[in-house]
Amino acid sequence: MKRGDYTDMGGTGAAFLTTHWSLLEAAGSEQETDDKALIGLLLERYWKPVYCYLRRHGYGNEDAKDLTQGFFHEIVLGHNLIETADKSKGRFRTYLLVSLDRYLIKVRQKQQAQKRIPQENLVPFNVMGDAELPSVITELNPDESFNYTWVSILLEQVLEQVENQCHRDGLSTHWYLFSERILEPILAAQSPPSLDELCRKHQVEDSAKASNMIITVKRRFATVLQKHLRNLVASDEQVREELGEIKRFFPDIAQDDQ
């Protein structure tokens, strides 16, 4: 698996989304908001976690895709979610998941969710790539699969930004050391190469210097990650909770400097 494909389900690789609570607050304000633009932004970030959650609840590929589309149209685009969103209650993704569970109850009761979506109002699902589940998801429960996928997409965006910063600032070798020692072994589920091996490959003086260069990138990673998380939650305490979630699924990439 390559970076940018953590979930094995494709994706657009677009820039990180605007703060999600801010999007919802704007939608509920007097300022006019383009519904299709709003749902498009939310779809880019959340369709994969929602889809994985539904698959782990036992829905097949097509049913899960239909339910994902129905949820975003009926609950998100229908403004039920937007009108009742309360930033003070915590993480947006937790709120989204509660709304999804309520939607599933509604679908089970009526058994005709798709018939209630006006065809002329459908937002094309061209943002959705291949919808096959990665193997790791099949080992997780529905809640864990949702969180794992959400974390994976977040890390993809953060790593892309850190990589661009390193190249811009003349730290390309720093990035290559970090990528080959930390990132690539995680994605390939392999043991990392030795520092001595990396020093020879990238013409770095010694392992101590290589280690410090890797720590430099890890600190940049931590800074960018925390910046993104602060845009997604309402308090520093919730930032710490999200960091704990990342360490749970990707401990090596979220570890402290060492």
Image (spheres, rainbow, N blue to C red):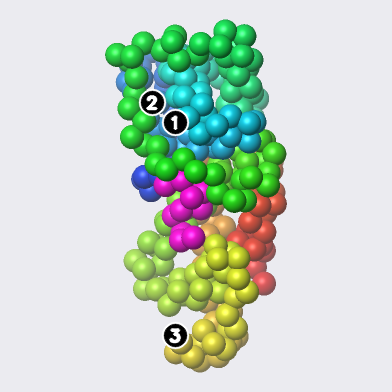
Q: Residues within 10 Å of mark 3 (few under 14, many from 20)?
A: few
Residue at left offset 54%, top offset 87%: 197
Check disc 3 and report its element: helix, strand or loop: helix
| Residue visible at 36% across and 45% down in the picture | 12
Q: CA distance from mark 3 to mark 2?
A: 45 Å
Magenta stretch bounds: 1-10
Identify residue for label 3.
Answer: 202
**Residue beneath label 2, please?**
38
Looking at the picture, tell me which residue is in the foreground, 127 or 173: 127
User: In x, y percent, where is residue 89?
Assistant: 65, 25
Mark 1 to mark 3 CA distance (whole Å): 41 Å
Location of the C terminus by quadrant is bottom right
Q: Which residue is mark 1?
A: 42
Q: Secondary structure at mark 2?
A: helix
190 displayed left or right of 164: right
Q: Foreground residue, 210 or 111?
A: 111
What residue is rendered at 63% in x and 31% in y?
58
Task: Provide residue 229's location: percent of width, then percent of height.
Answer: 56, 44
Please indicate, yes or no, whether residue 101 appears anywhere in the rendered image.
yes
Vertical side of 111 occupied by 248: above or below: below
- Classify 125 as above or below 1: above
**Sequence-wise first label, 3 or 2:** 2
Density class for disc 2 (Cα within 10 Å; few <14, some 14-19, many ≥20) is some
- Tell me: residue 197, above or below residue 35: below
Cα–Cα span, label 2 and label 1:
6 Å
Assess whether residue 9 is covered by the magenta stretch.
Answer: yes
Residues marked 2 and 1 touching at CB (< 8 Å): yes
Q: Find residue 188 and report its image quarter.
A: bottom right
